[in-house]
Amino acid sequence: MVRPRAPMLSVEKIALAALEQIDATGDFSIPLLADRLEVGASSLYHHVDGRAGIIEAVRQHLSSGNAGALLVETEPSEIAGAADCLDQSDWRVMLRHWARAYVAAMSVHPLAVPLMVREAVNDETALDIYESAAQIFAATGFTSQQAIIVMTFVENLAIGTALDEAAPEVPWAGDPERHVALTEALGSVAPGTRGMLAFEFALDAAVAAMERMLEQNAAQEDAD
């Protein structure tokens, strides 16, 4: 019996082809994308809603590797019940794991980041991650405003760190004789580690600030 052929096009194939272009040029072109996939441009629109749909497909592809990040010790398929895992995972562990997974996903294709930040997130997998984070923060004792501040911080930190991956190894090319302290500082870290050291520093500062938030929230409740 002849096995059916795999579909010529899929959202995943379109996303991967778009990422090839983005990695090479920092952007993608629908006509070039259609040529790469050996289809007419109109065929793409049967699977994605124009340029925004392709960017969303790219986001979905990258988010799929991050979907289990919040649960730490559970399977990605269980993300819908993330709030129930609080007895398994301290919020600090969850926050660090999520932020690191986010950076890891974005850093693979740093040139895709500027394209994604221009579009609102519609991908259900990505939205489920944020929903799970909001549930966990609420159950831990953070206010809604504090939760959105923290989630925005994680996103901004991850985006900035991922973009730094595309930066030159030496971002500040000063004159060693004129910029002595700067040159010494740059030489104090191993090649390729500067960005992640800064990331971990910011993450530590965030955890400390969040611990103070919880203390203040508890004190306010006692006062009330």
Image (cartoon, grey):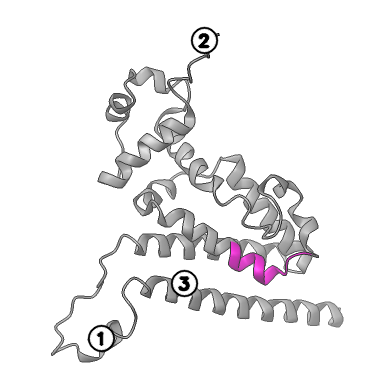
Residue 98 drawn at (x, y percent): 59, 61
Q: Residues within 10 Å of mark 2 (few under 14, many from 20)?
A: few
Question: Where 101 falls versus 119 (above or below)?
Answer: below
The residue beneath circle 2 is 2
Q: CA distance from mark 3 to mark 1?
A: 20 Å
| Main secondary-structure element of the magenta-colored stretch | helix
Residue at image location 47% in from the left, 27% down from the top:
48
Residue at image location 34% in from the left, 21% down from the top:
41
Furthest toward the top, the residue is 1
CB within 8 Å, label 3 to label 1: no
Q: Nearer the viewer, residue 59 or 222?
A: 59
Marks 2 and 1, the one that precedes in the sequence: 2
Residue 126 drawn at (x, y percent): 58, 47
Q: Which of the 4 image quadrants contains residue 51?
A: top left
Query: What amino acid is found at the position of numbered circle 2 in the picture?
Result: Val
The residue beneath circle 3 is 199
Furthest toward the front, the residue is 1
Quadrant holding the C terminus: bottom right
Residue 157 drawn at (x, y percent): 48, 65
